[in-house]
Amino acid sequence: MSDKDKSEKWSEWIREKDDPTKASGKPEALEGLTVLDCSNSSMSGLFASSYLAEFGAEVIRIEPPEGDPAREFSPWGYMHMGTGLGYLNEGRNKYHVTLNLKEPAGQQAFKTLAKRADVIIETFLPGTMDEWGIGYRQLSVDNPKLIYCALYTYGQFGPKASCGKADVDVVNQAYSGVTAVSGEPQNGAEPSPSEVPTKAGNWMGWYAGGAWAGLAIMAATHFRHLKGKGQFIDISPAEAFGRNINYGITYWQAFQQTLPRVGNLDVGIFPYTFFKCKDGYAFLAGFADINWKAFCTIIERLDLRERYPTVFDRLNLDNMKVMYKEIEKWTLARTYDEIFEAVMEYNRTIGVGVVVPGKLCSPKDAMGTHNWWERGVLIKQNDPHYGELTIANMPHKMTGSPPRVKWVCRPVGADNDYIFNKKLAWGPTKLKEMKEQGII
């Protein structure tokens, strides 16, 4: 059997086992886990609970009576059916209730919920929930198996924990150390408007915090399974994003210098960047010596290989700039498809060294990519309140207990009756009293 036939056999088998459209008929990994998400004005907690909800946890969003301010996070203030675009992505699979945690009656209601909860997520200033009498210290007495995750830029202890500054994504990015090494290099004595430290275009600090929080929560549930005990989890989104700084810290330790900003270049490998082409940008990688030889063969510039034969030659920043301009002469004369075909033809037929091509995709390009739809990375969901929405699905593909999106979002307080009647077995009279008091 040829390699191609073997590959097709495998593709058919795994596609059948891993088909994302069949997720609804399979078990959920976190079924039975109840999560109370008290995130406030923060996407980090919302992303953490989205993560858990997609794996089957029953997530109950606790919002103030006027709604979480995060519902208004949206480009140019655009609102769809009263909700911002950011929240439409992170309200998925969750029940939404309103509860005034600043009032004694609301705190008492929350305590009742917390007795039956497995996980609590909150993003208030450190000690706020504890001051209200509903922090981990108090709730774990009645529920020792409780897993409580608090997210805040500077963490729950340390010199900065009590500074009182709000947790915002840009501060998380800046404090992480990653922003300082991101952006275009400064060429003159004074930086131009584009030669400054540059944040990621999305809420990367918040999302990194949420991702690490979700992972820690799942690790804590396993520990609880083994030992029967819950625990407190302290997550700093800034520290979480800083965990992605690769060799930045060790470089500082070795040389007492901060890595320079080099834009789309990389101080560790070259070529490994985007080059302008006729119809956009093409990513090309071929940094090991044997791959560099292949790269120069493809672009018909063996003279470059002779001038810069070793990795160390290619990692000189001045040499990088020269090589970049020479390589871009070749890419500018071609479309991305022509570049892709030239590279893959070499990889298929000669195969001495490998060059990796890639295309810079805009959101529009990504939404038009058949492979993403085929693999369920993008899905269209017809939400009963918000209508048809295209959203990013979970990247995980799992044959036994795949994650899934069941619904997109809920309006503020949409599920109060469900929670307080079914979960706590409180009757309509008690529910009416709490609504009249502004507690829910």
Image: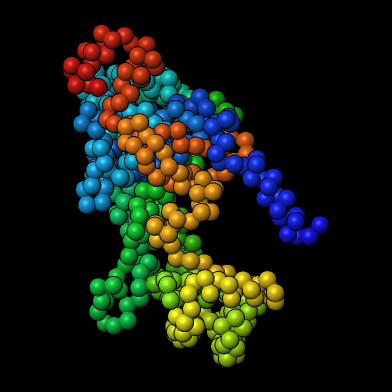
Front-lying residue, 202 or 283: 283
Left or right position of 194 against 13: left
Q: Is residue 31 above or below residue 298?
A: above
Front-lying residue, 52 or 75: 75
Q: Which residue is drawn at 39% across and 45% down?
A: 390
Q: Residue at x 34, y 44 (%)?
A: 43
Left or right position of 359 against 8: left
In percent of width and height, residue 206 lies at 36, 48
Which quadrant of the figure has residue 101?
Answer: top left
In percent of width and height, residue 140 lies at 41, 24
Q: Residue at x 28, y 22 (%)?
A: 107
Residue 417 shows in the view: yes
Where the C terminus falls, by quadrant?
A: top left
Left or right position of 346 against 56: right
Residue 158 shows in the view: no
Question: How many numbered marks appear?
Answer: 0
Q: Residue at x 75, y 60 (%)?
A: 3
In percent of width and height, residue 379 lies at 45, 44
Q: In this view, does 391 lie above or below 225?
A: below
Which quadrant of the figure has residue 182?
Answer: bottom left
Where the N terminus falls, by quadrant?
A: bottom right
Front-lying residue, 71 or 81: 81
Front-lying residue, 433 or 357: 357
In percent of width and height, residue 197 lies at 32, 67
Q: In this view, does 318 lie above or below 30?
A: below
Q: Is residue 153 above or below residue 302?
A: above
